[in-house]
Amino acid sequence: MNKKQITGMIIAAVIIIVTGITGIASNVISEKFKESAAKKEEQTTDMFSSLLDSGEVDIDAPDGPYIGRLDIIGTIQGSTSDTLATGDTSTYNHNVLMKFVDEMEKDSNNKGILLYVDSPGGTVYHSDELYLKLMEYKEKTKRPIYAYFVTEACSGGYYISMAADKIYANRNCMTGSIGVIMSMYNYSELFKKVGVEEIDITSGANKAMGSGGLEMTEEQKEILQSMVDEAYDQFTGIVSEGRNMDINTVKKLADGRIYTALQAKENNLIDEIGSLDDLKAALEEADGVGKGVEYYKPEGDTFSDIFSSILGEIQNITKKSDVQIVQELINNPTDGVLMYYAK
């Protein structure tokens, strides 16, 4: 082997070593940067979440007769901080709606409520809480509630609308999805591949029921199914009462499917197919309302709205690593939660 060959081999070896070291360093720096960015994003979200939770609701109702409009738009769930955690930037604000109904109940200028529904549904708890609040309003005030279905009024959105005296739907609306779902992930096979084992010290065989790192037993499936069945019976009972339909007829329709506006009308799930103006004209004919009544909806705190939008955009543009994606799946706040929701 001559001198040139030896020199070439040495140079090649040096290049390989330098390239390897550079690659490793680049990966380490990249991962550290991602971790730092993720940590900063989490800290920022936590900071603004606390600010958003303290946001006030601006309810400045008209001095004259008015109809209160409740926007049931997006996923029906808890407060603004909850929506930030899930990355949901929908306009649904449960706290605002609940407070608004309370305010209207005490206000003699209020002549009724218009539910403007464009939602796939949401949690059993929040759907039922708003429904019960609306029923309380009706019982105490004897004022009308009308609902208008926009593009979708499914599951929890339909559930809440059972408080309405009349339901109008856009002709292109999808509705129904009368049923209950409880979704969860099982990560046991993934854990095996990466060498992770979940260990739970529990007080009973079913205490860790539904945990993603464990296989679910038949007994546990039966327990969870009983919860779903109970929520389903509640849903179909509400529909039976709200639509004045026999419970067996309701259950035949309530297999979870969605219906077109025409199908819904044929099955007595809605009253009319028409525009929002059609609904308003009919509502103004209702007892105690009157023509030319003003329509009013409350506004959330502007500070909260601005930062909710900003954080939503940040979450949309921030590239997530595979680890972050898996972590979000594992920490999904709706995992194992009873939902009146159309997937």
Image (spheres, grey):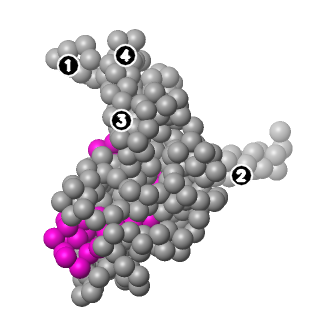
Tag 2 secondary structure: helix
Q: Which mark is residue 11?
A: 2
- The quadrant holding residue 61 is bottom left
Q: Residues within 10 Å of mark 1 (few under 14, many from 20)?
A: few
Residue drawn where x is 49% and y is 74% of the image: 281
User: What's the residue type where badge 2 is placed?
Assistant: Ile
Residues at marks 3 and 2, CA–CA distance in whole angstroms: 81 Å
Q: Which residue is mark 1?
A: 202
Q: Residues within 10 Å of mark 2 (few under 14, many from 20)?
A: few
Mark 3 vs mark 4: give the one in front. 3
Residue drawn where x is 33% and y is 28% of the image: 230
Residues at marks 1 and 2, CA–CA distance in whole angstroms: 61 Å
Number of on-image labels: 4
Residue 117, magenta (yes or no): yes
User: What's the residue type where badge 4 is placed?
Assistant: Glu
Mark 3 vs mark 1: give the one in front. 3
Residue drawn where x is 83% and y is 39% of the image: 1
- The quadrant holding residue 220 is top left
